[in-house]
Image (spheres, helix red, strand yellow):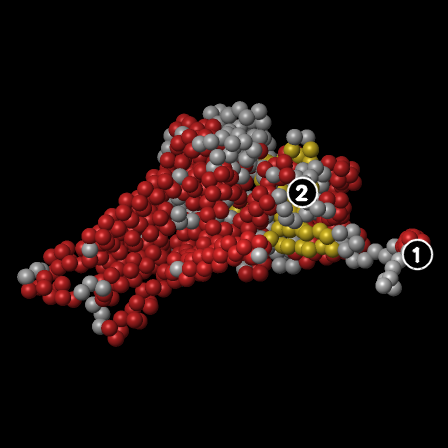
Amino acid sequence: MVDAALSAPREVATTDSRSGLRRAMQRKSSVAFFMALPLISLITLLVLYPALYSLHLATLNKSMERFVGLSNFTFLFNRQTFWLVVKQSCIFAITAVVFKALIGFIVAHFVHNIPAKGQRKWRGMLLVPWVIPPAMSTLAWLWLFDPSYSAFNWVLAIFGIDPVPWTGDAYWARFSVILVNIWIGAPFFMIMYLAALKSVPEQLYEAAEIDGANWWQRMWFVTLPMMRNIIAITALFSLIVTFANFDIVRILTAGGPIDMTHVFATWSFRVGIEGGDIPLGASVSLFMVPILAIAAVFILRDITRRGSEV
Amino acid sequence: MPSRNKISRRKFVATTAAVSATMVAAPFVRTAGAAGKLAIAFWDHWVPGANNATKALVEDWAAKEKVDVQIDFIPSQGNKLLLTIAAEAQAKSGHDIIAMSTWLPAEHARNLEPVDDIMAELIKQNGKVNATVEYLGKINGSWVAVPATVGSQIKGPCSRIDLMKQHAGIDVQAMYPAGAPANADGWTLDVFLKAAEACHKAGYPFGIGLGTTADNVDTAGSIFHSYGAVLVDANEKILVKSDPVRQALDYYKRLMQFLPPDVPAWDDSSNNKWLVAGKGALIMNPPSAWAVAKRDAPQVAQQLWTHGMPAGPKGRFAPFVNYFWSTWSFGKNKSAAKSLLAHLSTRPAAEKMVAASGGYDIPSFEKFQDFKTWEEEGPPKGTLYHYPNRHNHQILSVAAAPAPHKIAVQIYVQGLMTKMAVRHFQGEAMEKTLAWAEGELEGFMRS
């Protein structure tokens, strides 16, 4: 009897915990969490761990034996080449994103106005630059820009125009890497903007037309406000990716001539891996993180605010 | 119920003794892999079939020593070998033997097993190595890597016999006759400049790159050395604002006007393509361009002659870059690794590797500069006779030496000398270029 009396509460506790677990498992959020767990583990392993490890590396001295705090960053701030890289990364990313957005916007409108029957073909063709691995397509561009055998120069020569040092002159080289980035990235903007355009209700245009709005007013007061969120997200996403670009510059110019096309990733590789100064390389690659994070917070906050207003 | 399998103390002792006696009396049978395993990462040679010679040599050794070997040939394209080395150094785990290019033994010296014992023996057997090999492989008085035959190369001039004779009036075969010492006292940087001008006028400019990749930097290094121009000395003293550096930069400025206009964008393949396409009269390269021409443009290959560098005021310096074989200090089978390194550094082994590479590879040891391959390769026969430094005709040097390695590697990989030359050529005042270089060098000093 005594035994039975003592064991009763334990049974109740076990039953409670089992039903609690069952309830937790039945909750949608728990199920979602467990279903996302493989992805979360993968991201932790492949993104979070390397990110934290590079933070750790950035706080070490050159031989990676001593903690030096933020010394690597203060060292970089005194380097002329570093500020050249900062300037170039900004020129590269901002110019490329602006042109990608502009071209994407214009092309999206053209495609949107193509009759539905033939639109799919155009969409598919226009996406080609974006779906080819950039390392491969940049190699093709490299041959087009080749110092000695440029196909572009061959065409120019037919018209009696002097050859252009596409990758040999600092300013032409900057133009070339930005051009290739735009060529690869514009289709992404195009497809995002096309999706946004298709979601704008036709009634809004009809109402604007009844009110006597011209093409420009329809664009300014209907299309752009309706696309605002997608424009902001696409620009932010592209800005982050373009700032972190490595393959195009690495393949096309390797940062040259005389460092005039280096961006953060290529200079980080040059200093860290090729030059054997891994902590400094890690510091270079991390420099943009806080700036881009702040930009992301502001843009995303703006989007959330507009979302809640709607 | 008592167990039927119960073993008495007496029975246990008797059985154990019998087993021990059997084991002692049995003959020792060495199986394949009895001496352990060895994982090796070699540089993946660009010459088709060249890896096979190395592989065969390793397998012969492994069969004899009963070692189970695993060989990986890792290409340097895309920095794959460089990244593998960096990853293994970070993980403190990886191959037992790994090939390292020029600056990497110094960079990873802390993680490398000293090989003084092997090197002492090899130098005794094979002759001494040149000062550049010692500078790159002997760190703080201790050898940390064995100079490899595979991948080591001299990047001297490879000239078009016909174009040099026709446009510059220079008979490169007479200067560097096959089977005889060089007759090149008059082959100086001034003559080289005049030849560059003449060939440029004739429409066949010399193809000397001024990008930041190895071929470009190596050429700049040897021209700087020829003027005695040192950017940083062995005591970390910055000497960039010196007359020899000014002279070297001035020479480059005069030379660059006769080079193709896009040389600041050239990489290591640009000069090869320039020569093979028949566009130029001379490049600075090991015989890879000639080997490609032999396959793709035989009429060009027949006119190519590899020879020595022109002399400057301070001597005749040739660009030389070394590969090394090293073993990690955290390696699991260091004794076997060292045994293999010694085996790969014997004369017959080196001779096989040189033959397999068509003469491209150059062993570092003094007694290994007279292999038949370099005499026999062609067409034209004898084209590689003067590729090795067989008559000690020139000083083999590496760009950025004698700066301490941590600074030298930055000078080298950042292409500081070629960038200085381009900046000055593009109109920047000499003193401004020197001040910029000084600022860069101060940054390279960090520890």
- Under circle 1, the secondary element is helix
User: Disc 2 residue type?
Assistant: Phe
Residue A89 shows in this picture = yes
Name the outermost residue toward the front: A1
**Is circle 1 on the same chain as circle 2?**
yes
Q: Is residue B125 or residue B282 the one in the foreground?
A: B125
Could you tell me if the residues under marks 1 and 2 are in contact, i.e. CB atoms within 8 Å?
no
Q: Is residue B52 or residue A36 the one in the foreground?
A: A36
Chain to which mark 2 belongs: B
Q: Is residue B241 above or below residue A250?
A: above
User: Disc 1 residue type?
Assistant: Lys
Going by the image, does B239 lie left or right of B152?
A: left
Which label's residue is closer to the chain start, 1 or 2? 1
Q: Is residue B221 or residue B312 the one in the foreground?
A: B221
Give the label, 1 or 2, closer to the camera: 1
Q: What residue is shown at x 23% (from left), y 59% (from top)?
A: A106
Residue to which mark 1 is pinned: B11
Residue to which mark 2 is pinned: B330
Q: Is residue A165 or residue A297 the one in the foreground?
A: A297
How many other residues sit within 10 Å of disc 1, few (<14), some (14-19) or many (≥20)?
few
Q: What residue is shown at x 42% (from left), y 58% (from top)?
A: A24
